[in-house]
Image (cartoon, rainbow, N blue to C red):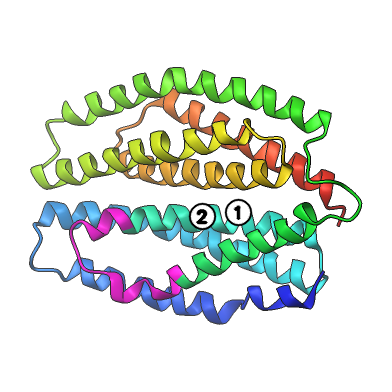
Amino acid sequence: MSNELRYSYEGESEINKMKSDLDNMFSSIDNNIYISKSVRNALIETFNVMRNYFSNVEKISKALSEAYSVNNTKNILSNEIELYANLDAINAMLRLMREYVKIDSNTENIEKLTNRTITTIALLIQIHIQHNAEKPDKLDNEIKSELTKYNALINEIDEFIDEDLDELKRQFEGDEDLTRGTYNVLSKALSLMEEYYYDNAFVFALNATDTDKASVALNELIEAYASFSAFKALYSVFCSYNICVKHLEHTLEKALQGTKHVIDKIIDYYIKS
């Protein structure tokens, strides 16, 4: 792998900066006197979900460090994609919290890591797929077949999402124990879920099945995977209040696993180690 890529992961120092940012962010929520108690509690639940995704980021960072140390391109790309998906979930949480509190002074390192991850993924795809000396940037028959099955999966999922989201809305709107502040936060979370699905995940997923270039398909699949991850993170806020739709969880897992399956197929075809 080119030495040009070795800068792209800086390890524990950057993760430690993000830890400090999250601690400051929590204080800005917990000590905020300008929001109601119920809004503050809902934002703390959101923050706790975000902490779980940050724990994933810490684990992935260790795997990335190992992959870079042995120059394993396949593992680097796979872990960078997982890192991006978890960072997109974190950024979805940040979008929700920004509606109620000022946190931008504590998001610089998260944004920096997100942008560098995007850049690294793009560079790896450019080097190993777009400009692969042995294999052209064109979908082979096996990957075309996988994308055909993926298209059917995405359209099947789309048939159920409306109904599942309506059920989620029915549950939290009918929950008499929710305060107005909590209800408002959950309403915003649902709005963001709809955006991440209808404007992002579904569109990216379909785009991936409408190209003959492997690099384009992979880029679209990565964006779909990240958007599904953000959708799942926002859904987790509802589950913090025991508002869950089992069918939605099943549908979402199928979407995530199906997207990741095709991503892995493309990576395996172009990158051996």
Disc 2 packing (10 Å; few <14; some 14–19; many ≥20)? many
Residue stretch rendered in magenta on the structure: 95-111
Q: Of helix, strand and loop, which one carries label 2? A: helix
Residue position for label 2:
86
Disc 1 packing (10 Å; few <14; some 14–19; many ≥20)? many
Q: Of helix, strand and loop, which one carries label 1? A: helix
Q: Residue 219 location, x and y as percent?
A: 62, 48
Residue under the point 66% across and 58% down: 79
Provide the major secondary structure of the magenta segment: helix
Q: Where residue 210 is drawn, which disc sits there? A: none
Whether 185 is among the magenta residues is no
Q: Which amino acid does label 1 sit on?
A: Glu
Give yes or no for contact between labels 1 and 2 (Cβ–Cβ under 8 Å).
yes
Please say if 123 is above or below 197: below
- The answer to which of 72 and 26 lies nearer the viewer is 72
Q: Which amino acid does label 2 sit on?
A: Asn
Q: Point out the image quarter for the C terminus.
A: bottom right
Whether 107 is among the magenta residues is yes
Q: Point out the image quarter for the N terminus.
A: bottom right
Residue under the point 73% across and 28% down: 146
Residue position for label 1:
82
Residue under the point 55% across and 31% down: 206
Quarter of image, res 200: top left
Q: Residue 23 location, x and y as percent?
A: 34, 74
